[in-house]
Image: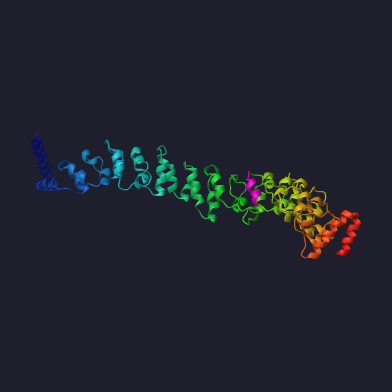
Amino acid sequence: MKNQKKFQKDDDVKSFSNSQKKNQQSILTYQQLKSLRNENSLPINIIRNFYKYLDMSKMTRTTPISTIISNKYLPWDKKELVKKKDIRMIHTKHFNLNWNYYKLTMDEPDKCNIAKFSRLFWSKKAIENIGPDVYCDEHLIIILQRYSKIDWDWNRITRRISIDVISNNTFLPWVKNVLTDKIMELPNDKKMSVLLKFPEEMINWKVTSLHFPWEMIGDMPDLPWELMEKYCCDCGKSCTHVLPLWVLRKLKKKSLNWKNITACVSYETIYANQDFPWDEETLLDDLDAPLWFIMNTKYNWDLKKITSISDWERIMYSPPNFKWDKDELASDKFDLPPIELIIRYTDVKWNWERYSKEFSYNDIINYRFLPWRWDIIIERNNIPFVFVKEFPEKNWICNNIITNNESRNTIVKTLEILKDIFPTDISVLIFKILC
């Protein structure tokens, strides 16, 4: 049967050749026509004129696809057509063929052609399996728009795409946290200009607020900053890096961490700006606050606690009208107070029993008008002789008095005898004469 078809084609060629010769319009001889059949590739003009006598399967295989499309009426071999990979043919409707678009999409050597020719019949499943990494930023945006129903890994894509490209395509579902992190990695002098390119809902303002300097926030106070967790400082009132007052004034109506801010801002600033909502609890917890600040502010200071943690030096050099807690002053939590302090606060119920045991003899001599407990003083050991001379009228115990020679020892014993014989005033007078 095949031989019969072959002979028939040969007869056709002969008939055609004879006809051409007869009309004297012959272009090719019979022998030439026969040789054409054995050619692997021929110009399109030869194919057009002699396609009936050619091996069109071979011609389909070797002819450029653009030429085939331009001459679609020729009897090209469809089995060979489907083997060709040129995108201009694969996605054309000129041929009613069952293309394997998944394979053709996966095998496409230049994946950016998928974006460049986005209206062609690419396989959505293949594009999803290929993933986003094969495209440049420009073409990836086209793919993302064209195939928006694919479940893209937007975390990964947002990390990869440049800020500039994202800002020009804000309608895509970029991941807020990843985008915010990208902005935060920029230098401070660029952050704000980039931030303002995006709609507010695209930004994680909590993270942004934590990273932006206070001064930049103060320059744009109307942005939806979230400042409750924004770090201020941990070094207390001595800090020199706290947010500037002009920034604080612009932001004072926002929800700020006034507890942290109050702990950092100086007392002078707080006192000069009492219209600010400073955190009272933070202030009251600072028992070491300056006394002038405590006296001149209306906070509910715990003066008992303040007194309890203050040393005698702080109390001694405090303003005279500072309201120290008198009961706390008189407690035994302290070391001995300066004698000058006792004189200043005469209305305090000082512990004279303790003081009479522990104050120096010189203090007792110099401040003899104070209400010392003499019954306790005379019981003290190692009482100096000079102390007895100052207070001979007291009922001294001879054994408790220190004397550095025999004569003084005799005088003390004499005083003891005199008190047994004479009234106190006479015995004191005689004692003074003997001394």
Which residue is nearer to you in this view: 343 or 2? 343
Would residue 258 be counted in the magenta stretch? Answer: yes
Asked where in the image residue 55 lies, by quadrant, the reply is top left
Asked where in the image residue 81 lies, by quadrant, the reply is top left
Can residue 411 be spotted in the picture?
A: yes
Relative placement, left or right, of 83 versus 414 is left
Say which quadrant the N terminus sits in.
top left
Q: Is residue 68 above or below residue 418?
A: above
What is the magenta segment's predominant secondary structure? helix
- Residue shown at 81%/60% (left/top)? 387
Relative placement, left or right, of 337 versus 180 is right
Percent from the top left, x then y, of residue 302?
Answer: 72, 45
Which residue is nearer to you in this view: 74 or 13? 74
Would residue 167 be counted in the magenta stretch? Answer: no
Which residue is nearer to you in this view: 327 or 231? 327
- Residue shown at 21%/43% (left/top)? 60
Percent from the top left, x then y, of residue 295?
Answer: 76, 50
Residue at far top of view: 1
In magenta, the rendered stretch is 255-264
Can residue 196 be spotted in the picture?
A: no
Percent from the top left, x then y, of residue 19?
Answer: 12, 42
Percent from the top left, x then y, of residue 157?
Answer: 42, 45
Relative placement, left or right, of 277 versus 172 is right
Relative placement, left or right, of 435 versus 291 is right
Say which quadrant the C terminus sits in.
bottom right
Colouring chosen for the image of the structure: rainbow
